[in-house]
Each structure stands twice: as C-alpha cells, then as structure tokens.
Amino acid sequence: MAEDTLNIYEKKAQEMTATNMITREDTFAKTKGGFLCLDCKGTHYDRVRVSRLFPFSDADRYLSIREYGNGDKEIGIIEDLSSMSEETQKLIREQLDLYYFTPVISKIMSIKDEYGYAYFHVMTNKGECKFAINMGANAVAKLSDTRLIIQDVDENRFEIKDVDKLTTKERRMLDLFL
C-alpha cells in the first residue's frame, strides 16, 4: 500500500513539473463569448488564459497558456509567439492586450500626497486619467534607470517609458517615488 501511494505522489509530481510546449499544430479559436479556447494534443479547453512569463523583458516569448478556472493550471508554454500562425498570433495578442492593458503616461499634471495615498492626474496614450496609489505598498517599480511601472489601488498598471523625457517640474513631482 505505501509503495502504491508513493507512486501516485511521484506521478503527480512529474505532472506538476512537466513542461508541455504548445506548437503550431495546437489550435486556438475565439468562442462566441469572445474568449480564447484551445485544442492541444487531443484535449479541448473551453477557455484559456494567456500570461507572459517575462512581461517586460521578453513580451512575445515564453507565454504561459493556462486553463481558466480549475486553479489556472498550466496547459503549456508557447516558446515564441512568432512561431505560431498569423491567425493564432492575432488571437493571442488580443488577449494579451486586454490582460496587460497598460496606458503610457506622457505628462504629469499633478501628484498630491494625502493620508498615505498619492493622487495622480496624468495624460496617457489612452487619454486623461486620475488614479491613486498607496504610498506604503511599493506601487512604483523601477524597471530600469528611466522606466517605471505604477500600480494603482485598483491594480491597474501605468507605464512611464522614460522619466528623462518628462519636464523638470514633472520629474520633481516623481522624486518622492524615485
């Protein structure tokens, strides 16, 4: 009995650590509801989620395809999006654009610090926007000496591609976070 239990745990461990590569032969489609489904190596998945393993440094490589719900169990990895058909690339990019919606801040009109929160009023590539961040929550992440990602209290992400392109006044407003 103990040996059978051990074999079950070994099999589960192998399944959990196995990496399945998704290739051109696996097919993605859009459902009537606008979700992404997948037929992969003989199994149909009604709804899948795509996430980037390296979202900032290698956005189109190593994409994790996960079963929606069911603990978001990983189905497999697309090593390079460009290796997939053009239609598949289009479908996956649509999903990534929704999931990784990140307006780029081009101008900072104001930042007000009040009661542990910073209130931003900015212009982005998607229009004018106001949002708040929690000052004690590491909401501003430096990706490089000049590139920032800001996450607001609602977990929306905003990007400043190059702080050096901001005016001196705008950079001074950001000094608190740099």
Image (cartoon, grey):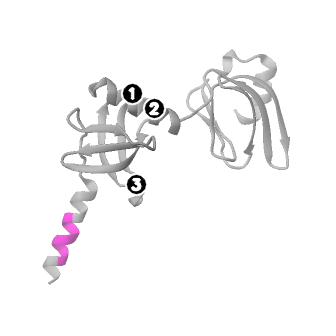
User: Which of the two residues, 132 or 85, is positioned nearer the viewer here?
Assistant: 85
Which residue is the site of mark 2? 94
Q: Nearer the viewer, mark 2 or mark 3?
A: 2
- Binning the other alpha carbons within 10 Å of mark 1 as few (below 14), some (14 to 19) or many (20 upward) gives few
User: Which of the two residues, 96 or 34, is positioned nearer the viewer here?
Assistant: 34
Magenta stretch: helix, strand or loop mostly? helix
Residue 6 to residue 174: above or below: below
Say which label, 2 or 3, has the lower sequence index. Answer: 3
Q: Residue at x 23, y 51 (%)?
A: 43
- Binning the other alpha carbons within 10 Å of mark 2 as few (below 14), some (14 to 19) or many (20 upward) gives few
Which residue is the site of mark 1? 90
Considering the image in quadrants, where does the N terminus appear? bottom left
- Which numbered tag is attached to residue 150? none
Number of dots carrying numbers: 3
**Part of the protein shown in magenta:** 5-11
Is the C-beta separation of discs 2 and 3 under 8 Å?
Answer: no
Q: Amino acid at mark 2?
A: Glu
Q: CA distance from mark 3 to mark 1?
A: 22 Å
Q: Amino acid at mark 1?
A: Lys
- Binning the other alpha carbons within 10 Å of mark 3 as few (below 14), some (14 to 19) or many (20 upward) gives few
* Residue 71 sits in quarter: bottom left
Which percent across, then down, holds residue 14?
21, 59
Which residue is the site of mark 3? 72
* Residue 144 sits in quarter: top right
Say which label, 3 or 1, has the lower sequence index. Answer: 3
Which percent across, then down, holds residue 114?
86, 45
Which percent across, then down, holds residue 9?
22, 70
Which percent across, then down, holds residue 75?
30, 49
